[in-house]
Image (tube, rainbow, N blue to C red):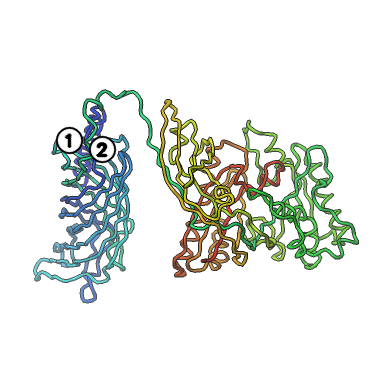
Amino acid sequence: MLHYTKQKITLLFSVLVLAATTAHAQKEQRLQPVWWFGESGAANFNFYRGTTQVLNDNLTVPAAFHKGKGVRPYASLLTEYRPGKVWGGMLNIAYDNRGGKFKDVIAPCNCIATLSTNTSYIAIEPSLRIAPFANSFYIFGGPTVSFNINKSFTYTQEKQADLRGEWSGIHKTLLSAQAGAGIDIPLSSKTNTTQVMLSPFVSFLTDFGHVPRSIESWSVYTIRTGVALKFGMVKKTATKTPIAETQAAPATVTEKEVQFSVRAPKVVPLNRQVKETFPLRNSVFFDQSSAAIPDRYVQLNKTTAVSFKENQLQESQPDNLNNGRSARQLAVYHNILNIIGDRMRANPASTIALTGASNKNPSEGKIMAENIRQYLVTVFGIDGARISTEGRDKPVIPSEQPGAVNELALLREGDRRVDITSTSPEMLTQVGGSTAGFLKPVEITTVQSDPLDSHVLFNVAGANDAFDSWSVAVKDEQGNVQNYGPYTSDQASIAGKTILGNNPQGNYTIAMTGHTKTGRTVTKESSVSLMKMDDPKQEGLRYSILFDFDKSKSIATYEKFLTDIVSPLIADNGTVIIHGHTDIIGDEKYNRSLSQNRATDARQILERALSNTGKKGVKFESFGFGEDAALAPFENTLPEERFYNRTVIIDIIPAK
């Protein structure tokens, strides 16, 4: 039976694909409603696995049943949302019968025993709908949530009356998943404003999660075949373009449609006091021509080291530079040797390991590590036995990968360093725990100029593929125009203060003009209202997490830190802005994607943590800025700046 069913499913799927190929070749121009409604009917080919013997509290049968199958009905009311030709969504509210008959067994009486069931559910099935060829063939997949409405069974055994009852331990709710394919066959004229489709489909519903009972191991997977009838409405205005014009349009050029949107703050904060937990990168970077500690690292003498305290770095540091680049944070990092000396002096039991790396010259790497050791011993009076040293030709986690050919000078500059590691809790960061390698962060307070939530963000989804370049014109109510651009990526950012200038507030029309790769000009418009706000009492929080070169999956290292340390500081109705960055090494488009992945992963971890604690009204925004120099936290001149640019920054803004 199962083999026969698989043959039928394979044949139906082949028919669907063949029909899809034919439809793709015809490229029929048909009105396409965005919303569709209808109903479907299908046959569930149900297959049982596992073991069943205890039917309920009053009935345990003498022989266990293992496998089974059955064909039962399925019916649903459906809704589809298709904003474009490829991507869309589906929702089915269904009656879903997963009944069947278990394979007969031989009871101890040497007689045949049978067991059948009529378990059924009300199912909610949201799915992602994808038409990969942008035609009538589509695939879909998503979760299924099932609510039990029938849990009856019938047990028969020769020479005794049939036993009917209800299963015990039935789950009221099940969460599983499905995937399938279908094809839309039009039943109406292609110009009719009411479109009607008949859609044969086939789907597979996994038994992962579909375990009907809390006891024993019975599970159900299903192959479903059926047909749906769908109706969609198109506004009459959608048919204004004459057929002749459509036929005359060049058929050889296909351009993707871009979507233009503007994210603007209701009020533009000019400055914000920020309490930042700044991660201390555990590396000292050496110049190519010398094994001496570079002059940019602050080096004290014995007299000044006596009075040095780590908390002094919170005061008397340079103000932030423009465009978010921070001299204050870099000044903190360049005191890394003094911070290490102060911590070891305050914690006599602590130890560190220094691993120096110099390309193809481990002995020089050892000298670099010894020079740092000598500084800590001589200036801070640390017992040399507490500091171990090692020389390598590559760091434990190198930037240069085997076979790399591009930008080797920058990669090797980053690999010429001494890494500082420790197993002493007073030296380690809470960020990522002992496996992260980073040292305990430094807390500093600063004033953030033009914070990210004060920026107007222009999003042109698809610009990277469709446009050679694009620009924006910002026009105020008096007709004055400010021009920005050109841009080539999908996103650009302008500080709200820059747009407002000397005005306390204003209303603006935004016009985006893009130049396509085929020579066309595309214009889209939006509008914003801006108003300045200066609230020196408002204090934000900032946390940063750092990444090694080209790594995004290491976000899992920070899950405990984000869940236990960061999420409790997010108050109800607050705003969390998460922005990912990279250094300038590598492809610009890849770097933007990498930074977006990092920011998205951090956001998902925080959202789960807040959901578990019942926080309400928190607004999240996440961005991936890649190597964008205008928004990078640091310059990219020094290797330590590039390492600090491999980051996700989390800004927590309290409710206003």
Q: Residue type at mark 2?
A: Phe
Between label 1 and label 2, give the one nearer the viewer: 1
- Residue that numbered label 1 is attached to: 191
How busy is the neighbourhood of tag 2: few (under 14 within 10 Å), some, or many (20 plus)?
Answer: many
**Where, by quadrant of the figure, is residue 199 drawn?**
top left
Label 1 neighbourhood size at 10 Å, few (<14), some (14-19), many (20+)?
Answer: some
| Residue 451 left/right relative to 304 | left
Q: Which residue is mark 2?
A: 137
458 to 608, vertically: above or below: above
Residue 541: image location, x then y, percent: 60, 63
Left or right relative to 109: residue 377:
right
Q: What residue is at 24 percent from the left and 67 percent from the top?
A: 53
Taking the image as shown, residue 3 lies to the left or right of residue 559, namely left
Give the amino acid at mark 1. Answer: Thr
Q: How many marks?
A: 2
The Cα atoms of the two marked residues, 1 and 2, are separated by 20 Å
Is 265 rendered above or below residue 32?
Answer: below
